[in-house]
Image (tube, rainbow, N blue to C red):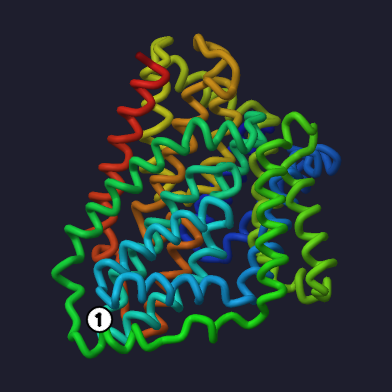
Amino acid sequence: MNDLALASLIFSVTYLLIISERIHKTTAALAGGLVMIAFRVLDQEEAFAAIDFNVIFLLVGMMIIANILGKTGAFQWLAIRSAKLAKGNPVQILLLMAVITAAASAFLDNVTTVVLMAPLAIFVASILEVNPVPFLLTIIMASNIGGTATLIGDPPNIIIGSGADLDFLDFLVHLGPIIILILVVFLAMVFLLFRHQLQTRPELQHRIMELDESEVLTDRSLLHKALAILALVGIGFLLHGPLDYEPATVALAGATALILIGRQHPREALLEVEWSTIFFFVGLFMVVGGAEEVGLLEDIGERMADASGGSLTAAAMLTLWPTGILSSIVNQIPYAAAMIPVVREMNAGLPVGASASNPLWWALALGAGLGANFTPVAAAANVYVIGVADRAGYKVTFLQFLRYSLLVTLVSLVIATIYLWLRYLL
C-alpha cells in the first residue's frame, strides 16, 4: 500500500471514529496521529511540526482566564441582573440571555460560556416554572453565532486565523458586521418560536425581582483584576499584528498575569483547562498533517477548484454551504482543520488577493461557525448543554433539536451567502 492510500485510510478511519463517537474523540485523534507516525507517513519531527502551537496555547491561555473569571460569580450576577431588568418576563429574559451568551462567546470559548450560562438558565426557568429547553437551545445557538465573530470565539476560527495568517482585527472587521445582523435575525426567530411556550404567573415573576444579585459575587477583588486583564488581552489581540506578537503569546501573558495578581495557585488554574480538548487538537493536527504530507488534501483542493470552473463566486459557495452542512455532521473542529490546506490549494487557481480580503476564508469561518447550530453533535458546546438538559430531566432528541436548528441554520447561511456576494463577489 502506497503512502497516499495508507494516509487516506488512516485519515478516513480517524474521522469516522470521531464522528461515530464509538470511542472518545481525543483517543481517536491521538491514535490516528500515532498510527501516522508508526507507519512512517510522517516521521516524528514532521508530526510535531504539524501541531499548531499558536492554536494550542491560545486555547490554554483563554481557558485559564475564563475559568478564573467564572469563579467570581460574574456570570451569575449578569444573569440575575438581566432577569430583573426584564421584570421576570420569561421571553425578555430569554432574549437578554441570548445577547449575553453571544457577546461572551465572542471573547471566551464557547464551551466555557455555555458551562457558565446553562445552569443559570435552568435556575431561572425553575423559579418561573417554565420549560428550560427553550433557554438551553437558545444558549447553544447564541454561543455558536457570537463565537463566529472573532478570532478567539470559536475553535475553527483559531485554526483558520493561524492557517491563513489572519489576526483578531481581521475577524472583527470582516465577520463582526454580519454576525451582528444574523444575531438580530436570530433574536426575532427566538421570539417567534418560543413566545407561546414561555408563559408564567405574576407571583413567580415577583420571585425573580426579590433575588439579590450582589450575593452571588464571591470575590469582587478577583473580579476587578480578571476584568482588567481581559480588557488588556482584548487590546493585545487588536494590536498583536503591529506589535509582532502571536495571539497565543498575548493569551498566555494574560493568563500568567491573572494567576500572579489574582494569587491563584498554578495547579488549580491548570486543572481547570480542558486538557481533553487540547490533546484532541494535538492528535488532529498530526492526522491532518499526514494527509497533507502525501498530497491527499491538495488533491481535494484541486478537484474543488476545478468544480468551481475558475469562478470565485462558485468557489466561495462550494466552501460555505458544504462546510455549513458537513461540519454539523463531522464536527466543526476537525472539518475546519482538514479544510485549511484544501482552501489554500483552491486559492492557487483563483483570482484572490491577500488573506484578509479572500472570501474563501470567511466562507469557511461562517460555514463552520453557523453550521454548528445544525445538529446536537456539531460542536462541543451543543453536546455539553444537551447533557445538562438530560441531567435536569429534560431529554432533547435529535429531531426535537432539528425542529428549531434547521430554520436557524438555513436562514443564517442564506444571510451569510448574501453578505459574501455583496461584499466580496459583486
- Location of residue 94 in the rendering, given as x and y in whole percent from the top left corner: 31, 67
Q: Is residue 66 above or below residue 346?
A: below
* Label 1 secondary element: loop
Which residue is painted at 53% across and 82% down in the image? 214
Crowd class of label 1 (few under 14; some 14 to 19; many from 20; radius 10 Å): some
Residue nearest the viewer, comparing 236 with 318:
236
Q: Determine if residue 30 is in view.
A: no
Which residue is painted at 57% across and 21% down in the image? 345
For residue 277, what is the image quadrant? bottom right
Which residue is painted at 65% across and 32% down in the image? 292
Q: Determine if residue 41 is in view.
A: yes
Q: Quadrant of the C terminus?
A: top left
Residue nearest the viewer, comparing 199 with 212:
212
Q: Quadrant of the N terminus?
A: top right
In this figure, what is the number of numbered marks? 1
Furthest residue toward left: 196
Relative horizontal placement of residue 183, taking residue 191 as reference (left or right): right
Residue nearest the viewer, comparing 52 with 183:
183
Q: Is residue 23 above or below residue 145?
A: below
Q: Is residue 171 above or below residue 317?
A: below
Relative horizontal placement of residue 46, taking residue 202 as reference (left or right): right
- Location of residue 153 in the rendering, given as x and y in whole percent from the top left corner: 55, 50
- Location of residue 121 in the rendering, given as x and y in whole percent from the top left corner: 39, 75
Q: Please state which amino acid type lies under the numbered disc 1.
A: Val
Q: Is residue 354 above or below residue 28?
A: above
Residue that badge 1 annotates:
130
Which residue is painted at 64% across and 26% down in the image? 295
Relative horizontal placement of residue 279, taking residue 423 as reference (left or right): right
- Location of residue 384 in the rendering, given as x and y in whole percent from the top left corner: 48, 69
